[in-house]
Image (cartoon, helix red, strand yellow):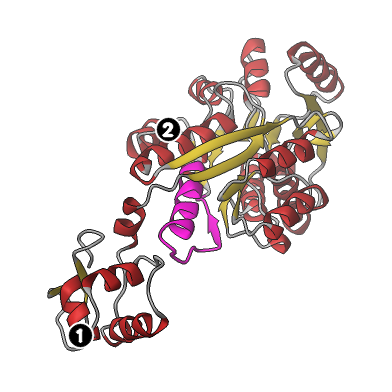
Amino acid sequence: MIESANNAVCMEDNYSKSDRIRIKDIAKIAGVSAGTVDRVIHNRPGVSSESRKKVEEALKKMDYKPNMYASALATNKVYKIACLVPKHNEGDYWAYVVAGMLYSVEQYIDFNLSLKIFYYDRCDDGSFTREGKELIKYRPDGVIVAPLSESETSDIVSSFKANNIPFVFIDSNIESLSPLAFYGQDGHRSGVFAARILSLMAEKNEPAVIFRLMYEGRSGSNQQIIREAGFREYLKRNCPEMKIYELDFFVDNFKDNENIMNEFFSKHPEVKCGITFNSKVYIVGEYMHKLGRDDFRLIGYDLLHRNVECIKNDSVDFIIAQQPSKQGEYSIKALFEHIILKKAVKPCNYMPITLISKENIDYYFETHNLIN
């Protein structure tokens, strides 16, 4: 192992792994100067092809593996990471994702890693593309993207590939675009899991309602669509007689959302079970708590503070957690290992599908030390 950029290397075969050999010892084996060995190891200019060949043969014979940490610390290069995520408010799901990224960047501060965040507006059809173009102008070394549809995302990804920029998808995956890595839940399995829990909560296959969060006529995220597909697949196969209603909500429009629910439940008082596939289950939970309805069973996603309060006051029964802060943290780590340490990165990384209730929520926080 190299202890510093110029001191020692790991040798195998004829040497034990605990033995260390100095640069000057490699030079002696190769028949060149120590300075020449140092320049070859760190890929610096000023070495003849003959000398380089001698050093490379010596290193190959010893099965030399460079200490990439030491090499990265020795350079003054600034590595620019950029991310493209939805606009959000403090306490929202994406705030936790960004917090995880910032935490991870702080861990690699000695390696001159920087992070620039670009925000797109899900209520503006052209925002994703515009912000993506601005991101490309920034000329980053690596990118993290919360993708929209495949057609919208592929245009930006083609620019990444043309400029040899590695990219990571977060929250939802588009496998056909071949990201370096993906961090998020298996949306389909998560939806199936949610359907299984809901079917156990519903009495005699009573009707249920899906509360959808909409952004200017479109569903909030790819994950919501994928989860709902898995949910419906399970119910069709196992509870075909269960009637499912749909109720669309709109972002940051509490009064209208309240009126929508008032109208729905006045028409369908028999519906006492529901689910959201997004992080804003508190919209429904707070409504039920305000009315004093303790007969409605409700499932949602993500341990945002307002969702946690709903769990604790019994207006939400279950939350499916997916650790957004860890998604952000691991995405930065993947790019760090790929770009700086030249390590292979696992392509698909599913987050756990964790069911949280009032009974285990405090233990969950103690175990993870961070919300979600």
- In the rendered view of the protein, which quadrant contains the N terminus? bottom left
Q: Which residue is mark 1?
A: 29
Q: Which residues are magenta?
A: 328-352
Q: Amino acid at mark 1?
A: Ile
Tell me which residue sits at (59%, 34%) in the image: 117
Tell me which residue sits at (23%, 75%) in the image: 33
- The image shows residue 151, relative to residue 101, as above or below, that is below
- The image shows residue 56, relative to residue 209, as above or below, that is below
Q: Amino acid at mark 2?
A: Ile
Decide if residue 71 is on the left or right side of residue 226: left
Q: For this rendering, which residue is in front, 109 or 260?
A: 109
Please indicate, yes or no, whether residue 245 appears anywhere in the rendered image.
yes
Decide if residue 123 is on the left or right side of residue 314: right
Quarter of the view holding residue 166 = bottom right
Q: Which mark is residue 141?
A: none
Q: Which residue is mark 2?
A: 361
